[in-house]
Amino acid sequence: MSKKHDYDVLIIGSGAAGLSLALRLPESTRIAVVSKRELKEGNTLYAQGGISAVLDEADSMESHIQDTLEAGADLCEEEIVKLVVEHGPQNIRWLLNQGVEFTQQPPTGSSGYHLTREGGHSHRRVVHAADATGRVVELSLEDQARRHANIDLLEYHIAIDLVCTPRNDGSRARRCHGAYLLDLKKDQVRTMGARCVVLATGGSNKVYLYTSNPDVATGDGIAMGWRAGCRVANMEFIQFHPTCLYHPDAKSFLISEAVRGEGGKLVLPDGRRFMDDYDPRGELAPRDIVARAIDNEMKKHGLDNVFLDISHRDADFIRSHFPTIYSRCLELGMDITREPIPVVPAAHYTCGGLWTDSRARTDILGLYAVGETAYTGLHGANRMASNSLLECLVFSELAAKDIAGQLRQQDEPLPSLPPWDESRVTDSDEEVVVAHNWDELRRFMWDYVGIVRRNKRLARARRRINLLQHEIREYYSNFRVTNDLLELRNLADVAELIILSAQLRRESRGLHFNKDFPWRDDSQRRPTILIPDNYVPRDK
């Protein structure tokens, strides 16, 4: 392997978690950041709402902590919630230093910034950049990363698998030494060595037919970590965003929760509100409650969608606070200052992921996971709005500190890594198999493992995924890897983890609702942890 393919830190993923981690490492660190498409493409870019943090004197850390615990349906790790919330303000200041410009509108509060309120929050604490916070954050971090000579940006590369080997000290613990990457432009596999590897690939919601996520959200980091021997936790808790724009030409366009935070009402075609029938908090109830309410109303009345109406607010207010949403809807022939917005729920956020500790370390030495790829314990059974970007920032900070310490202690050379072996595979002449399995997987996950579940549906999904896994593994063994095949393989692994986790939780809690177990059972007040066959406990 060429020396130029060796790095101190290999970061797989280029969203807020991956880029902020890269920028926080010492400038003496040689870093590679890997992106499947262009650097900015990912969930961060499309995040509209904002970042929750205690910035106003009328708010408090205790309130943010309690709101998060309540939204998480008593399944959050309280110490992790406290850790993340207390690190919130300093991370907002860090973003300001990176050139992020948040919306200012004094005298809304003592912070000097316009703070909005979203579902589950008892105070206005969501700092934002109009309705395009993710885009502003992502582009600012990308601009900073491109200025750093120690950061190599590898766009159009998709990771295939991690390279992990036993340690040399006789222990059973394993260490990650790098990864195999497919260069999509050259159609070549590269062996990439690194002293530390970070999985920051985002979530897995392309496993569902309807999702707010971009096409790259195929659970790559979760699947690779699982195959390498990492535990996963809470994969049954998939958050369905209540309000994705319903229009044939509006693929994956989200209507921010901030629209409801600023007075938007959910209504039926006849204009009748319905959220008060489900929760006293109405439209500001946590997302799981709102999504199930919309799903129930659609099924009860045979509707394709419901409507979100903010047209009663001043037109200038709407245009200034939601310029992205206003412009996109106007392009599609809808003036949201005069008419309601057609919306449906869509898969939005993966609350589970690779188990990590408070320093973002996984079960494998030298391997970290940050952002939506990781299960940290922050979200519990349901993520509270705008806590996701906060988690990305806080855990990238904590991981960067730990990685810097690990690098100072390491002086041994990287081992020679085995090259990628293509000697027994050929080019595929059956690409239709990949396309068909991709479509079937996403459809049965939507039908059987969606917002509302039943035992029979989960059993059907389990049978289907077992058959698909067999077909995909056979295909993977015989043909050269492609982007579509790798993403399908990862989605199938993630689908299996979601199904297994949902079958293990025999209650309804947070985002997991099973009609055969419609009650909460506090004897099951613990995370659902799946352990792979090749799991080995790591040394502390």
Image (cartoon, rainbow, N blue to C red):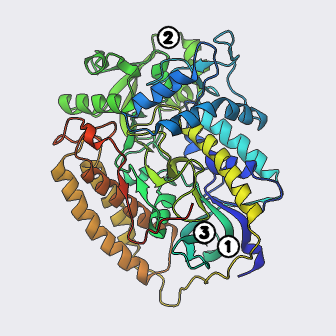
Say what secondary structure mark 3 lies in.
loop
Say what secondary structure mark 2 lies in.
loop
Q: Nearer the viewer, residue 17 or 264?
A: 17
Point out which mark residue 184 bears.
3
The residue labelled by disc 2 is 313
Residue 289 coordinates in the image, percent (x, y):
32, 29
Q: Is residue 200 above or below residue 4?
A: above
Mark nearer the N terminus (3 vs 1): 3
Residue 395 coordinates in the image, percent (x, y):
61, 45
Which quadrant does the N terminus fall into? bottom right
Q: Is residue 36 left or right of residue 430?
A: right
Point out which mark residue 193 bears.
1
Amino acid bearing label 2: Arg
Report how far apart the C-alphas of labels 3 and 1 lie in the structure. 19 Å
Q: Quadrant of residue 392?
A: top right
Circle 1 packing at 10 Å, graded few (<14), some (14-19), many (20+), is: many
Mark nearer the N terminus (3 vs 2): 3
Say what secondary structure mark 1 lies in.
strand
